[in-house]
Image: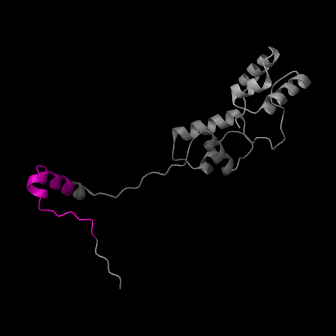
Amino acid sequence: MARLSREDRQIALGRLQAGQSQSAIARHFHVSQSTISRLWVRFQATGSVADLPRAGRPRATTAAHDSFIRLHHLRNRFLSASSSVQALPGPHRLSDQTVRNRLHEAGLRARRPHRGAVLTRRHRQNRVQWGNQHLRWTVRNHLRHVWFSNESYFLLQ
């Protein structure tokens, strides 16, 4: 079941105060009738539709730290989380996993630089030479003698 956003809760509350039924409002927002009922009870008790504070461990980073981590990794996509921890300003030290969590929340994923084959100057020259020799190859003249098959030879012993 989808959670109602703060704006949707305000709209639902307005509809309740205007006299619309709870079930009609629930159908409109695609939630259960008990969700609207609890919203109404909470409004009558507290005078607000805001979320109540929840228990849980407080965040180790502030919004400024989260922004710094995100920008730091956007500028250099191949940084490790441990090198980010060392670059963070502030007196307290974060764990590498906390940095990974913040990057994941920001939609950034791990990246590794591509390590391709090392080509020497001679390799590149040979490739260009082969390409120039076969530049004018056509299917009619050169590839018609090639036999394409999907059959494979298997040795079972």
Q: Residues in magenta?
A: 125-151
The percent position of residue 155, horizontal first and vertical second, equals 32, 81
Numbered-mark total: 0
Name which residue lies at 84% across and 34% down.
Answer: 53
Q: How is the image coloured?
A: one colour
Name which residue lies at 11% across and 62% down.
Answer: 145
**37, 49: nearer the viewer:** 37
Q: Relative to 124, is 13 above or below? A: above
Q: Quadrant of residue 149?
A: bottom left
Q: Residue furthest right?
A: 45
The percent position of residue 28, horizontal first and vertical second, equals 69, 25
Q: Quadrant of residue 10?
A: top right
Mark yes or no: residue 125 visible: yes
Q: Quadrant of residue 71?
A: top right
**66, 24: nearer the viewer:** 24
**1, 80: nearer the viewer:** 1
* Left or right placement of residue 116 versus residue 70 in this view: left
Mark yes or no: residue 85 visible: no
Q: Residue furthest top?
A: 18
**46, 135: nearer the viewer:** 46
Q: Relative to 5, is 79 above or below? A: below
Q: Is residue 147 magenta?
A: yes
The percent position of residue 121, horizontal first and vertical second, equals 24, 55
Q: Is residue 49 magenta?
A: no
The percent position of residue 13, horizontal first and vertical second, equals 79, 20
Task: Check the picture and name the quadrant holding the N terminus.
Answer: top right
Task: Check the picture and name the quadrant holding the C terminus.
Answer: bottom left
Q: Residue furthest bottom?
A: 157
Name which residue lies at 18% across and 52% down.
Answer: 128
